Each structure stands twice: as structure tokens, then as C-alpha cells.
Amino acid sequence: MHKFMLNNFIFNNITILFLTTAVLITILTLISAWKKIKNYKSLFVVNFIFFLISFGIVVSTKNWFIFMIGWEIISLTTALILIWDSKDLAWEYFVIQFVGGSFLILTILVAYTNGYHTLGPINELWLQLMFIVGVGVKSAIIGFHIWLPYIYKRASASFCSISSALVAKLGYVILLKIITNGNRALLYLGIIMIFYGGIKALANKNYKLILSYSSISQFGFICLAIGSGNQYGYYGAVLHIIAHAFAKSTLFNTAQNWILKFKSNSIFDFSASLKELNINTISTIIAFLSLMAFPLFIGYNSKYLIKYSLNSIPIFKFLLHLGSILTVTYVFKVLSIIFLADYKEKSIEKKVELNYQLSSLENIAVLIPSIILFVLAIKPDLYLDYYFKVNYLSAFITTSIYILIAYLIKIPLISRIKNQ
């Protein structure tokens, strides 16, 4: 057994970091979803356990056969989560994942016949491109992304949390392992994803769609990091996978609480949020601050490394700054509408009558991952085994400029979105 594990699995700092993240997010999502599940709760838990085991297998194995079995089990278990929402939706999602999996199996067979007998660095550009297409469907790379907002808009928070935070990231984890010297195509795809997802998030008032398109945009930052092909990009991608996982699991789980409270998906209907759902509000704000790369949160550390990885490609670094401003703008839009102003003319009392109350466990489930976003930023070298120094004075100056530009963009934007 020891020999089998040694020959087929790798356990290093990065693998353990991914596994720990998956365990925490899965448990906290299950807690957050528990009161909202009406039937077959034990089956729901069993399904989550199988998902977690399969996720651990996929991120740690170097055996192609074990890898594919594990990922297809993940596709099945996440499709089963959707059954609690809609059988038709679960079937549609499974078919999409099956199509992506089929091409990925073909790609793995091609890689194997070309001498790549274990999951590791691949040198041929054409084969790297095949893998980008193979994981693209499952991980919503631009061009294969259409399913993500379609499914997320209709799915429960528990599915969206697990999918955006963990499942859709698997493709990028694999690309990290096989593309070690950079890939120009990923750079272009990453930029397109950042701007496409950001603009769509900016133009929407449906909260779940905002979070969906935001996921696509944030995946673009990971693509850029992997495409850079240097050490800064590698660790930037690892950190951003973790940062986005905790941020987006928090945001989707808190989103479900907003929706249940106010019986609406529109951010313009979320009134008196701080008064009514204070822990939910605090957790949401923290997660958004990390997402927009505010200093002192792990989301800043990850984007700092990604920007540094592009020093040798000035045009991409400039575009990355623009993409970061776009992220700050849609985050600022959401925060200002939900928390800083009341755009509704309807009485707050009428909305409070809906009165969905969060349990202590639900509050803990959304608060813990938001706190982790701050804790992870304190000493990332302790768990990365890689040291980098952040100039926080420069960080706050840059972020202040981003916020000022976002504020100027936000003023005419909100009125237009509200009237759509």
C-alpha cells in the first residue's frame, strides 16, 4: 500500500494546502446548507463525503487513470447536488461535464502515447492546447464558459459554492502541473476572461449572475498567472485559487441568505442588510474586499504576485491593472447598493416581515472562511514554503487609485442598471 501511494500520489505543501481548503469549504458549505435542505439529508451528506474524497484524489495523484476516475466521480457527485434543486438542471450539468470529460480522456490518451506516462510537465505546445480545451469545458475557460452563469443562476448556493470554489478550479490545478514554462494562449485567454466576466458582472443586477461572471473573471487571473510561466506566476496562481475559493464560497453561501431573506435575486432589493443580517453582511464585505485585492487580505497577495510575474510583458501588466480596476468597480457597485444606500422606495418594515433568521451555525459557516481570508495573508511563506515581501504603502496607494476610479465609474452606472 505504501509503495502504491508513493508511485501514484504526491503530498507536498501545495497539495496539502488544496486539500485543507477543500475540507474546510466542504464542511462549512454543508453546515450553511443544512437548514435549507428539506429531504434526504443523510444522502446529501454521503454525497458530499464522496465528493471530498474524489477531490483529494484528483489534486494529489500523478496517475492519469486515477485522475480521470476521480474527476468523473466529482462530476457525478456535483451533478447529484443539483438534484435537490432540479433533476433537469442536474442532467444538463452532467451532460456538459461528460462532453468535457470525453475530450479530456482523448487528450490524456494522446499524451500517454507521446511518452507522458504520469501527470506532470508537458513541453509540446499543441498538446498543452489540447489540455486547455479539455479542461476548458469543465473549468469554464472563455469559449466554453456559457454553462456556468446558466447553471449558477438556477442552482442552490451549496452547489455554486462547491462548484466555483473547488470543482471549476480543478482544471487550473491541472494546468499548473502540466504548463510550467508559460503559454501565450493562456495569457490571451486570461485577459479576455478578466474583461468579459468583469463587464458582465458590472452590467448585472441579479446577484447570483454577478457572482457567476465574477468567477469567470477571477479564473482569468489564474490563467494569466499560469501563462506567465515563472515562479511568481506559479505561487500567484496557487494563492489565487485559495483566495478565490474562500471568498466565493463565502459569497455564494451568504447570497442564499440574502435571497431567502428578501425573496429576490436583485441587489436593489437587499435593504437594511447590516441591521437584519449583520454576520452575513460582515462576511460578505470581507470576502469582497479580498476579491478586489484590498491590502491585508490574501486576495491582494495573490494578485500582487500575478502582476509581478508579468513584469517582462508590460502590455499584459497594464491590462491587468485595468482588469483590477474593473473588479474593484463591480465590487464597489454591489457594496454601495447593498450596504451604503437604500435605493428602494418600499418600506423596510415590509421586507423584514419575510424574516428569514440565520442560526448560530449558519453564521459561523459564513464567518470562518471570511476570517481565513485575513489570516492567510499574515504569513503566506509559512504554508507556501516561499517568501515574498509586500510593500503595503504602495499597495494602499494603488488600491486607493483603483477605488477612486471605480467611484467615478459607479455614479452613472448604477442608475442605468437599476432602470434595466
Image (cartoon, grey):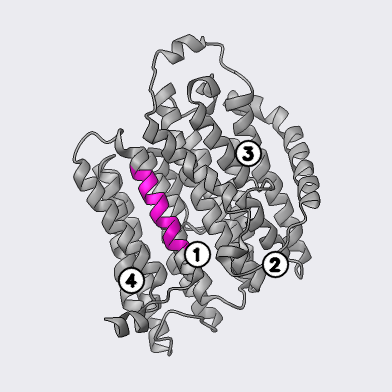
Q: How far apart are marks 1 and 4 (CA)?
A: 15 Å
Q: Magenta stretch? A: 17-30
Q: Which of marks 4 and 2 is nearer the N terminus?
A: 4
Query: Element at badge 3?
Result: helix
x, y percentage for residue 192?
62, 56
Q: Foreground residue, 338 or 418?
A: 338
Q: Residue 172: which disc?
A: 1
Q: Does the magenta stretch include residue 415?
A: no
Disc on the earlier residue, 3 or 4: 4
> In this figure, which residue is indicated by the disc labeled 4?
68
> Can residue 159 be spotted in the picture?
no
In primary-sequence order, the first of circles 1 and 4 is: 4
For the residues marked 2 and 1, what is the alpha-carbon distance in whole angstroms? 17 Å
Using the rendered image of the protein, determine whether residue 80 is visible from the camera's viewpoint: yes
Q: Of all residues shown, which one is farthest toward the bottom?
A: 115
From the image, tell me which residue sits under label 2: 309
> What is the distance, in whole Å, between disc 4 and disc 2 at their CAs?
31 Å
Q: Is mark 4 on a helix, strand or loop?
A: helix
Q: Which amino acid does label 3 sit on?
A: Tyr
Q: Are marks 2 and 3 in contact (CB under 8 Å)?
A: no
Which disc, if any, is residue 65? none
Give neighbour class at mark 3: few <14, some 14-19, many 20+ (Cα, 10 Å): many
Residue neighbourhood size for the residue with mark 1, other residues' Cα within 10 Å, grouped as few (<14), some (14–19), many (≥20): many
Queried whether the magenta region covers residue 24, the answer comes back as yes
